[in-house]
Amino acid sequence: MNRLTSLLVWIRRISYCRGFGIQSPNDYWFVRYVINEHWPYYQYEELGKDDDWLTQKLGRLYFRLANWRQPQVITANGYQRYFQAGCHKASFGEGAELVHMMMEGDWYERLSNIYNKVNARSVLIVEGICDNMDGWRNIVADERAGVTFDLYYCGIVLFDKKRTKKNYIINF
């Protein structure tokens, strides 16, 4: 994806900037201070020096998610150094606290396995939703998913059933 395409996506989603229109205080806080945090974190200087802009943007988001959730186990397809920088105590393996998956190959089967392991504190990051919007809509509509965030490049699914089910489109 080139810069022109990303600019067009950003302009199309301009009305969803910085948590505008989000009524839930928890969801607003999450969007403002985890997803769209613009202040530099302590690891940004070392992370992603040689990465392209999209890898760096997503990597920094994954860093902030790991920093926010502080999981014991991270299941990730790539971006390990970003996740590890966000939570030094985390190990990589098959868990359900913080899961990163790509929407490619047999993604639906992997998703079914993840759904069997999740709990209220679990966070699922689904990368590649812009290429498979029908698949993302199925994830959002699934009864096991709670609050979801559509960031165009990736989606974030929270499984806390105490919160009202809602899908937010975020200009990321």
Image: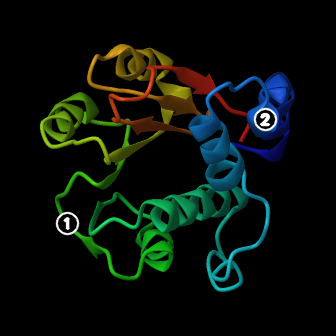
Residue at image position (84%, 24%) is: 15
Q: Secondary structure at mark 2?
A: helix
- What amino acid type is highlighted by mark number 2? Thr
Residue underneath mark 1: 93
Relative height, residue 6 to residue 85 (above, below): above
On the image, the x and y values in percent for residue 8 come to 84, 30
Residue underneath mark 2: 5
On the image, the x and y values in percent for residue 26 come to 57, 39
Relative height, residue 124 to residue 160 (above, below): below
- What amino acid type is highlighted by mark number 1? Gly
> Which sits in the foreground, 45 or 158?
158
Residue at image position (71%, 42%) is: 172
The way the protein has been coloured in the rendering is rainbow
On the image, the x and y values in percent for residue 53 come to 72, 59
Q: Secondary structure at mark 1?
A: loop
On the image, the x and y values in percent for residue 147 come to 46, 29
